[in-house]
Image (cartoon, rainbow, N blue to C red):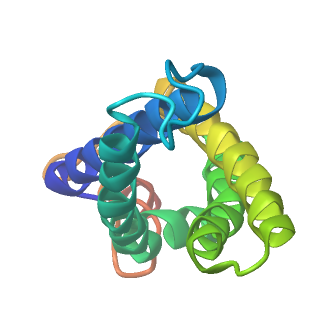
Amino acid sequence: MTRAEAWFTHGAALLVGGTGLVYGWMRYFVEPEDEFAVAHHPLEPTFQHGHILFAPLLVFACGLLWREHVWQRVRSDAPARRKTGIALAVLLLPMVASGYLIQTSSSDLAREVQVWIHAGTSSLWLLVYSVHQLAPRRRDVPSSGDVRGSTGPSGESTAASSRRA
């Protein structure tokens, strides 16, 4: 994964997670000033729209990382941050699917179920993402000419393959 891909992913996660948390707080925990108000806070629609507009960036970022980061780590024997990485991959599908289904559900019950699924999986995803980023990384000692963390065509780190040679 390149630095640009990492920063794009972090930025997308921050934008989507931040707007989602603020929107959820406004929607479910703020009391409206007017009892007939549609929105509980004047900025609630802005954060909702921002969340919906930024969400495809995070979906794209996760797709971008799938082959070069996620799938490669699943196939390798690298134990560092494996549990949180797998948890992120598993939580991604219900988080994304429920987010889209909230917007397309025709019954109130179906929408409410999707909101609960989305809020739960998204909160867990953000928590696990934070832990995944803060967990210690396994550092291979690169040999001359190797780039730390880079991988060869077989999916193993170049540092590991050069030690065997």
Image-quadrant location for residue 112: bottom right
Q: Position of residue 119 (x, y in %)?
A: 68, 45
Q: Does any portion of residue 152 appear in the rendered image? A: yes
Q: Answer with left or right where residue 37 lies relative to residue 152.
A: right
Query: Quick one: quadrant of the N terminus?
Result: bottom left
Residue placed most toward the observer, 43 or 10: 43
Q: Answer with left or right where residue 9 lies relative to residue 128.
A: left
Query: Quick one: quadrant of the C terminus?
Result: bottom left
Residue placed most toward the observer, 39 or 137: 39
Looking at the image, which residue is at 51% across and 69% down? Answer: 72
Q: Is residue 21 above or below residue 76?
A: above
Q: How many marks?
A: 0
Image-quadrant location for residue 154: bottom left
Image-quadrant location for residue 124: top right
Q: Does any portion of residue 143 appear in the rendered image? A: no
Q: Position of residue 104 (x, y in %)?
A: 60, 80
Looking at the image, which residue is at 47% across and 37% down? Answer: 23
Looking at the image, which residue is at 35% across and 36% down? Answer: 141
Q: Position of residue 24 (x, y in %)?
A: 56, 36
Looking at the image, which residue is at 16% across and 46% down? Answer: 144
Q: Position of residue 134 (x, y in %)?
A: 49, 23
Q: Answer with left or right where residue 165 lies relative to residue 102.
A: left
